[in-house]
């Protein structure tokens, strides 16, 4: 059974994490917090420090500076408690290829100290969850990439961890297998698991995750709610305004408002996109100014950008040196 933890204690609390490989500084200052039961995305360009961070959280590397707590347990001084609370799925399979699926999971269940009497029912439940029950007696080496990922996820769950650390779990999967994997992760979140997932498939993360951390060249560039990242541009909020018909005075009125910026009309449409600073004006004041021009408004809402666009704005071009 999972260990109870007060909801006020973060699932992950990482502060000023640093790590170097000889002359290469992989992590220079990584900071983020993950709340319990969240699905948290972890993204960054190649070489940003994602895998190093995951290995530290999984207690495979010891941080050279900074701290990382897993449900209040320090990964360096209390690593045994951390290992009981986490399930780590690396970006490559660590299953023994000559074993059957059941044998592989039974081996890891025994390694985690599960009693023989309860192991079979636990494994059967995990195979049902990952839709691999029909492959229970197949050799691991006979599995497709998608099936192997499902069994690897079951392996990470065999000791009923509270936190899943997933390093590129959808890498190499076809679209159907990716979608099915994401549905399994959603179900696990509903079951109370906290999920920390590193991935390059940004569109799927935007739909899946409650919160996200973006790192680049060893630094945290953003960490917080996914919705805030997609709607906010720094201190500004992005909005889109739709009119019944083009009305030139509207653009002039928007540009004249204090705190409003980046006013753009979509080509050939009566649609305006703009940002405003909430400390200097608000959405109702902007709408009142538009209506005062005599325009007929058909829609007025926050405008979310794609995660990929936010990612490109926050990260630097080129390969880290």
Image (cartoon, grey):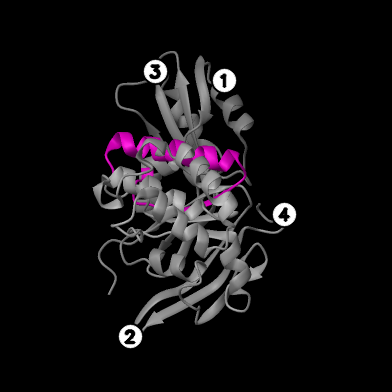
Residue at position x 59%, y 50% in the image: 118
The residue pinned by badge 4 equals 4
Give the answer, above or below, for where 38 lies relative to 75.
above
The local crowd at label 4, few if under 14, some if 14 to 19, many if 20 or more residues have their Cα within 10 Å, is few
Residue at position x 27%, y 39% in the image: 174
- C-alpha distance separating marks 4 and 3: 58 Å
Q: Work out whether residue 231 can be spotted.
A: no
Give the answer, above or below, for where 12 lies relative to 117.
below
Give whichever of discs 2 and 4 has the lower sequence position: 4
Foreground: disc 4 or disc 3 = 4
Give whichever of discs 3 and 1 has the lower sequence position: 3
The verdict on residue 221 being magenta is no
Q: Work out whether residue 194 can be spotted.
A: yes
Region in magenta:
173-202
- C-alpha distance separating marks 1 and 2: 60 Å
Residue 265: name its quadrant: top left
State if disc 4 and disc 2 touch (CB < 8 Å).
no
Foreground: disc 2 or disc 4 = 4
The residue pinned by badge 3 equals 246
The residue pinned by badge 2 equals 23
The local crowd at label 1, few if under 14, some if 14 to 19, many if 20 or more residues have their Cα within 10 Å, is few
Give the answer, above or below, for where 138 lies relative to 5.
above
Give whichever of discs 4 and 1 has the lower sequence position: 4
The verdict on residue 196 being magenta is yes
The residue pinned by badge 1 equals 291
Q: Position of residue 227 (x, y in %)?
A: 53, 41
Looking at the rendered structure, the secondary structure element under dot 1 is: helix
- C-alpha distance separating marks 4 and 1: 53 Å
Which one is nearer the viewer's eye here, 248 or 233?
233
Q: Position of residue 149 (x, y in %)?
A: 35, 48
Looking at the rendered structure, the secondary structure element under dot 3 is: loop
């Amino acid at each position: 059974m999972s260990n109870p933890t007060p909801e006020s204690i973060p699932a992950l609390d990482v502060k000023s994490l640093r790590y170097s490989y000889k002359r290469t500084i992989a992590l220079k200052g990584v900071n983020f917090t993950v709340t319990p039961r969240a699905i948290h995305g972890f993204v960054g360009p190649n070489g940003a420090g994602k895998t190093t961070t995951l290995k530290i959280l999984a207690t495979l590397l010891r941080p050279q500076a900074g701290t990382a707590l897993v449900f209040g347990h320090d990964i360096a001084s209390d690593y045994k408690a951390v290992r009981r609370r986490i399930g780590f799925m690396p970006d490559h399979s660590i299953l023994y290829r000559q074993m059957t699926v059941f044998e592989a999971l039974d081996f890891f269940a025994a390694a985690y100290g599960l009693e023989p009497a309860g192991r079979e029912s636990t494994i059967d439940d995990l195979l049902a969850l990952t839709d691999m029950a029909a492959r229970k007696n197949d050799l691991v080496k006979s599995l497709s990439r998608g099936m192997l990922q499902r069994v690897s996820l079951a392996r990470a769950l065999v000791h009923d961890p509270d936190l899943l650390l997933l390093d590129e779990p959808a890498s190499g999967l076809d679209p159907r297998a990716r979608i099915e994997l994401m549905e399994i992760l959603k179900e696990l979140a509903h079951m109370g698991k906290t999920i920390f997932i590193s991935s390059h498939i940004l569109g799927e993360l935007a739909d899946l995750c409650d919160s996200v951390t973006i790192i680049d060249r060893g630094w945290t560039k953003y960490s917080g709610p996914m919705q805030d990242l997609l709607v906010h541009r720094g201190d500004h909020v992005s909005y889109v305004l739709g009119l019944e018909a083009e009305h030139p005075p509207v653009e002039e009125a928007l540009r004249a408002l204090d705190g409003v910026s980046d006013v753009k009309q979509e080509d050939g449409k009566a649609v305006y996109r703009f940002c405003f600073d909430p400390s200097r004006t608000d959405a109702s004041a902007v709408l009142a100014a538009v209506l005062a021009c005599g325009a007929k408004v058909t829609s007025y809402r926050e405008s979310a950008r794609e995660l990929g666009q936010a990612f490109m704005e926050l990260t630097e071009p080129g390969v880290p040196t």
